[in-house]
Amino acid sequence: MAATIQSPEKELRFTRSGQAGLFWMVAAVSATVGITMLATSIYRDINPDLPHPAWAAVPLVLALVMARVAVWLTRHAYLILTPLGIEIFPFFRPAAGMRLVTWQEINHAEVDEKSTRLTLHHDPEKTSGIHLSLTPIRADRRSLLAKAVLGRLSPASPNG
């Protein structure tokens, strides 16, 4: 049973939808190969070298698995910005490996010029912190994430 979100209007959720595109493509190609194998199996009496129609199950099962992974990546969070801080979910076992970085732990944040990496510094000397890859997030959403994090940490922010 999924846990209920206490204040969903106060959080920003960023999913791994940028990674899902690759899995959707693999699913589409695999489904195409499987359907083609099924369609050509009616010509086995003319060309006995064609594969048996049961072999179509392999790419069709792969397509199903890849589509399920793509749906999972699209629906589940990678980063959640909450009033407490930033929740970071790893790819494998996200519920067990989730890490919360509170806003008080972050001295300042930086986003590289290509918006592919977010760095959260814990001290002004920049000797400790966290590097987060932003490539799992869709490219059009990265600027929103950067604006939200940098805006929250700016000195002029009323919440900062």
Image: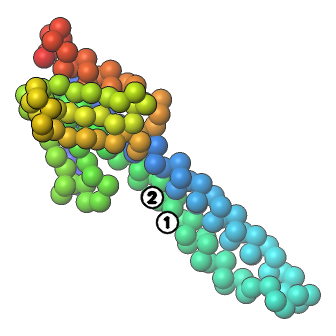
User: Looking at this view, is 56 or 111 the one in front?
Assistant: 111
Vertical arrangement, residue 18 with respect to residue 150, above or below: below
Q: On the image, numbered disc 1 is attached to which residue?
A: 65
Viewed as shown, does residue 83 lie left or right of 142? left
Viewed as shown, does residue 137 lie left or right of 36? left
Residue type at mark 2: give it. Val
Secondary structure of residue under mark 1: helix
Q: Is residue 11 visible?
A: no
Secondary structure of residue under mark 2: helix
Residue type at mark 1: give it. Val
Check if mark 2's residue and mark 1's residue have beta carbons within 8 Å: yes
Tell me which residue sits at (87%, 82%) in the image. 43
Q: On the image, numbered disc 2 is attached to which residue?
A: 69
User: Looking at this view, is 150 or 57 the one in front?
Assistant: 150
Mark 1 is surrounded, within 10 Å at the Cα level, by few (under 14), some (14 to 19) or many (20 or more) other residues, namely some
Q: Position of residue 36 (x, y in %)?
A: 76, 70
Tell me which residue sits at (27%, 27%) in the image. 110
Which quadrant of the view contains residue 58?
bottom right
Q: Is residue 125 visible?
A: yes
Q: Residue furthest right?
A: 46
Tell me which residue sits at (84%, 81%) in the image. 42
Which quadrant of the view contains residue 29?
bottom right
The image quadrant where one finds the C terminus is top left
Count of number-bearing discs: 2
